[in-house]
Image (tube, rainbow, N blue to C red):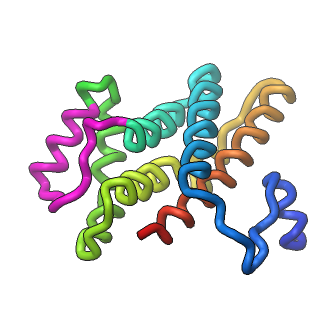
Amino acid sequence: MGNLTQEWQELGELPPVPGSPARPAAELRKEFLAALRETETFAEQQGSPFFEAFKLARFVLESDQVRLTGELTPERVDALVKVLKAAGFSERAGDVFGRKINVVSDFEPFQPSEEKLRGLLACSVADVFGGMGSWNDESFETEETHARYEQLSARLFSTLRAFTLTTLNAK
């Protein structure tokens, strides 16, 4: 393992300096959505099934059809999965959503805002890095395509982490 500064530079961003001012949540959300959109387009063009994870994360953040505040009973989760299917998502996306919604349930006792819940769920859905069968395992035929994948992955990773941290710290 290299030094920490080198590893962060490879991702395209250095870690924040302690005591530095926080960036506005709206700015980070916008950057995260842009990274999701761009990576989704690339993944779909390459025939990668991960495009739907990026699309689902955007849907959670942008759609008024998904409301997460209040108790998430199994019936309510089933109703939300039906909303996804009606919006054109696959059964697999519904299964992922059903598993990832637990991150929202963990925060129910704190009565977080709808915006915070959506942010947390979107970050959970979009976190496709690491582990067997992850986004990191994708391979491409040309060096140019692989270089684009690396660029998009670094951007998505850094915006995902920044938005996750900001969302967790939001009131």
Q: Quadrant of residue 16?
A: bottom right
Foreground: 103 or 165? Answer: 165
Residue 135, image x and y in percent?
Answer: 61, 44
Residue 45, image x and y in percent?
Answer: 62, 20
Residue 100 visible in the picture: no
| Residue at the far top in the pictured view | 45
Question: In the shown orientation, is residue 46 left or right of residue 4?
Answer: left
- The quarter of the picture where the C terminus appears is bottom left
Q: Quadrant of residue 44?
A: top right
| Residue at the far left in the pictured view | 75
Q: Quadrant of residue 130?
A: bottom right
Residue 158 visible in the picture: yes
Foreground: 169 or 146? Answer: 169
- Region rendered in magenta: 63-84
Query: Can residue 57 be found in the magenta stretch?
Result: no
Q: Is residue 119 above or below residue 56?
A: below
Q: Which residue: 78% across, 25% down?
A: 141
Question: In the shown orientation, is residue 66 left or right of residue 55?
Answer: left
Query: Can residue 70 be found in the magenta stretch?
Result: yes
Foreground: 56 or 66? Answer: 66
